[in-house]
């Protein structure tokens, strides 16, 4: 745990322009700086950095935050990792506290493994420039079309034929044999002697998502069939191959910016495409595609295009990948490279524009891909066509979102000219079985039922069910009907926005105002809104907004300035709160007709009109909500309940009429 005083020192030291400039070329525009946004593709700069506020904001994609938030977003780091990044940048010593001796030992051991792996990375790079490395390894890379800059950037290397070379170099630099063995770089045999795992091979370092070298892949250049073509690092404490993707460190920013990830199979597929200029590409080298790898991609995009060879093995791998990606709720397309080529060779034969045009023309959604593939096998055989339709329905059943399932089912029904209800029935049956299998597996492991099984009644799937799934989620304190969110969310958002932007501003009511209290200090915006909630014995119903409300007033009650409160919330570890505060703290540059008159009025005058009005609108919506609840209860109420419900309904109507009168509404 980083001590709070160190966190504050890091956040106070970090300068937003300085931090963002490490990744983006900024140009001064008056008191701010502008650039093309690093988070999405644009030609006209809409990314603004404000040194005075210590924040960045993109008016194109809506990304915003402070220095720590930028590092988290751009580098895909956790809050603590981003703090450590900034500490290293500014030379601030971070002394962890409250570590047990065991935790300290584990952290130090993990760091030793990373350092040993990074030493080996440097060693292999140096060897590539030696006599043996140049003659064999470098010559091979050049023969595959890789340029020296690509070789340097991606850290490619050469493992010499002498299996003791790495061990000797590591000993000379003081690295322990224990860590060489535990990183998988060295094999220790039963008789005690050691030898390098990688020798006489070109080397591909594998980076973690934060850029540290965690493993290696080595390719032999021999034609000897008895020698394995590839040798990969074994799994270690720092390397879990099922959770790692080759190229992710270099590709992650472009994946997020383009909102798409191209998934290929091999190291050279990634390198050749990156060198060509298509850099949102990663590979699942050393393992079949895993759920954990898909979830890693999902941190940066929901859209995956599988680009595999067009041979039998590539097609089989693509079919398997489709199911895994769909089950994670992501969108998947497939591009099969023409038979005889792979992404590596195809990208070396064509220009960037030609490859981009090919991808655009060859991309298929999974239904078209499977249909074209399997129809060729089915021919006119009605039973095989039935199997094909069932196969596609079972694939659609993997999709968690009911709206997407419905859309794909309807598209498939049109493609095969069958009644869509037939597909719905098959999909429902498949999901029911799938969820039952999940329940059984969870029970076998002694876990609670999986969320999918708990939340969905698969047997009742039908097109109309999709509508229920697109309604906003009901907060935990909301009634079961689910209409509170659309009624109250805009009102609660407006109140939180007023607190975040003007919380410490005084409300200077005129003496004839019903809110004026003679001899008393004027309310601040924050106090006025909080007092209104407390007087009504109500709290924010939206769970996310309530969390912001509570976090704000915790700092407000410590007498922090408004600027410090907002900055603290945006710099805080709770990134959901930081995100909401960032959104609501931005100035609204677009003036609507209804707000034009207000924009011509002094801020103090605007606030005495806007804040009470927002409270009244919120109260009106709460009353409207209660009226709807009473109407719902009346439908099933017994004779003894009807009288009380009608009496309460009359009271609610009177209250609402009074509020509407204050708002100037006519009912």
Image: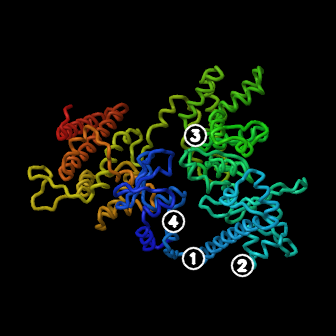
Describe the element under mark 2 as helix, strand or loop.
loop
Q: Earlier in the sequence, mark 4 or mark 3?
A: 4
In the depicted structure, whether residue 500 falls above or below residue 332: below
Q: Name the residue beneath numbered marker 1.
A: 100
Using residue 613 as the reference point, say whether residue 266 is left or right of it.
right
Residue 441 in percent (x, y) is at 67, 48
Residue on which the image places disc 3:
400
Residue receiving disc 4: 80
Question: SS class of the residue under badge 1?
Answer: loop
The residue where tag 2 is placed is 173
Mark 1 or 4 closer to N-term?
4
Measure how far apart labels 2 and 3 are at the Cα level.
Answer: 53 Å
Residue 277 on image: x %, y %: 62, 47
Answer whether residue 260 is visible to the viewer in this image: yes
| Residue 97 showing in the rendered view | no
**Is 127 on the left or on the right of 487, as rendered?**
right
Q: CA distance from mark 2 to mark 1?
A: 30 Å
Kindly indicate the quadrant of the structure image that contains residue 642. top left
Dot 4 lies on which element? helix
Answer few, some or many: residues within 10 Å of disc 4's Cα (few below 14, many 20 plus, some between 14 and 19).
some
Marks 1 and 4: which is nearer the front?
4
Q: CA distance from mark 4 to mark 2?
A: 31 Å
Q: Residue at x 82, y 60 (%)?
A: 136
Q: Mark 1 or 3 closer to N-term?
A: 1
- Of the residues under marks 4 and 2, which one precedes in the sequence? 4
Q: Earlier in the sequence, mark 2 or mark 3?
A: 2
The tally of labels here is 4
């Amino acid at each position: 745990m980083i001590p709070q005083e160190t966190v504050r020192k890091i956040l106070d030291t970090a300068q937003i322009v300085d931090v963002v400039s490490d990744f983006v070329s900024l140009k001064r525009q008056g008191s701010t700086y502008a650039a093309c946004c690093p988070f999405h593709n644009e030609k006209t700069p809409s990314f603004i950095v404000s040194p005075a506020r210590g924040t960045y904001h993109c008016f194109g994609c809506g990304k915003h935050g402070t220095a720590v938030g930028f590092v988290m977003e751009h580098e895909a780091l956790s809050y603590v990792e981003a703090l450590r990044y900034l500490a290293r940048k500014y030379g601030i010593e971070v002394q962890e506290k409250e570590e047990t001796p065991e935790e300290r030992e584990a952290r130090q051991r993990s760091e030793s493994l990373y350092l040993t792996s990074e030493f080996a990375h440097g060693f292999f790079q140096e060897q590539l420039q030696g006599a043996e490395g140049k003659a064999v390894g470098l010559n091979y890379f050049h023969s595959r079309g890789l340029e020296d800059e690509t070789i340097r950037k991606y850290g490619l290397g050469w493992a010499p034929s002498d299996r003791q070379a790495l061990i000797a170099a590591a000993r000379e630099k003081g690295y322990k044999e224990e860590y060489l063995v535990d990183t998988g770089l060295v094999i220790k045999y039963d008789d005690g002697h050691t030898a390098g795992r990688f020798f006489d091979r070109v080397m591909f370092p594998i980076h973690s998502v934060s850029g540290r070298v965690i493993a290696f892949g080595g390719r032999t250049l021999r034609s000897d069939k008895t020698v394995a073509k590839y040798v990969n690092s074994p799994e270690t404490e720092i390397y879990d191959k099922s959770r790692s993707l080759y190229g992710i460190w270099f590709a992650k920013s472009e994946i997020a910016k383009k909102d798409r990830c191209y998934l290929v199979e091999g190291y050279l597929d990634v390198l050749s495409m990156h060198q060509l200029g298509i850099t949102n590409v990663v590979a699942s080298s050393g393992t079949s595609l895993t759920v954990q790898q898909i979830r890693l991609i999902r941190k940066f995009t929901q859209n995956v295009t599988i680009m595999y060879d067009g041979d039998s093995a590539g097609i089989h791998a693509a079919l398997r990948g489709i199911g895994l990606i769909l089950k994670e709720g992501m969108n998947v397309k497939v591009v099969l490279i023409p038979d005889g080529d792979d992404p590596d060779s195809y990208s070396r034969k064509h220009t960037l524009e030609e490859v981009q045009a090919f991808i655009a023309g060859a991309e298929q959604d999974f239904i078209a891909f499977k249909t074209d593939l399997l129809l060729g096998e089915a021919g006119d055989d009605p039973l095989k066509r039935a199997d094909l339709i069932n196969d596609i329905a079972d694939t659609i059943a993997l999709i968690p979102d009911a709206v997407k399932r419905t859309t794909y089912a309807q598209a498939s029904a049109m493609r095969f000219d069958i009644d869509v209800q037939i597909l719905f029935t098959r999909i429902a049956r498949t999901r029911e079985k799938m969820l039952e299998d999940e329940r059984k597996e969870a029970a076998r492991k002694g876990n609670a039922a999986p969320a999918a099984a708990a939340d969905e009644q698969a047997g009742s799937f039908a097109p109309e069910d999709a509508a229920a799934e697109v309604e906003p989620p009901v907060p935990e304190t909301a009634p079961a009907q689910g209409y509170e969110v659309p009624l109250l969310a805009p009102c609660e958002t407006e109140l939180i926005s007023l607190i975040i932007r003007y919380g410490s501003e005084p409300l200077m009511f005129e003496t004839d105002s019903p809110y004026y209290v003679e001899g008393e200090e004027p309310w601040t915006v924050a106090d006025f809104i909080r007092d209104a909630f407390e007087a009504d014995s109500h709290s924010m119903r939206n769970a996310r907004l309530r969390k912001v409300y509570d976090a704000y007033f915790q700092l407000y009650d410590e007498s922090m300035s408004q600027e410090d409160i907002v900055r603290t919330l945006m710099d805080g570890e709770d990134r959901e709160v930081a995100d909401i505060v960032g959104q609501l703290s931005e100035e609204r540059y677009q003036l609507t007709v209804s707000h034009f008159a207000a924009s011509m009025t002094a801020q103090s005058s605007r606030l005495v009109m806007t804040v009470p009005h927002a409270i009244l609108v919120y109260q009106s919506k709460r009353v409207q909500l209660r009226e709807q609840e009473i109407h719902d209860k009346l439908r099933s109420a017994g004779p003894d309940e009807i009288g009380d419900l009608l009496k309460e309904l009359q009271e609610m109507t009177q209250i609402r009429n009074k509020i509407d009168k204050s708002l100037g509404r006519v009912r």
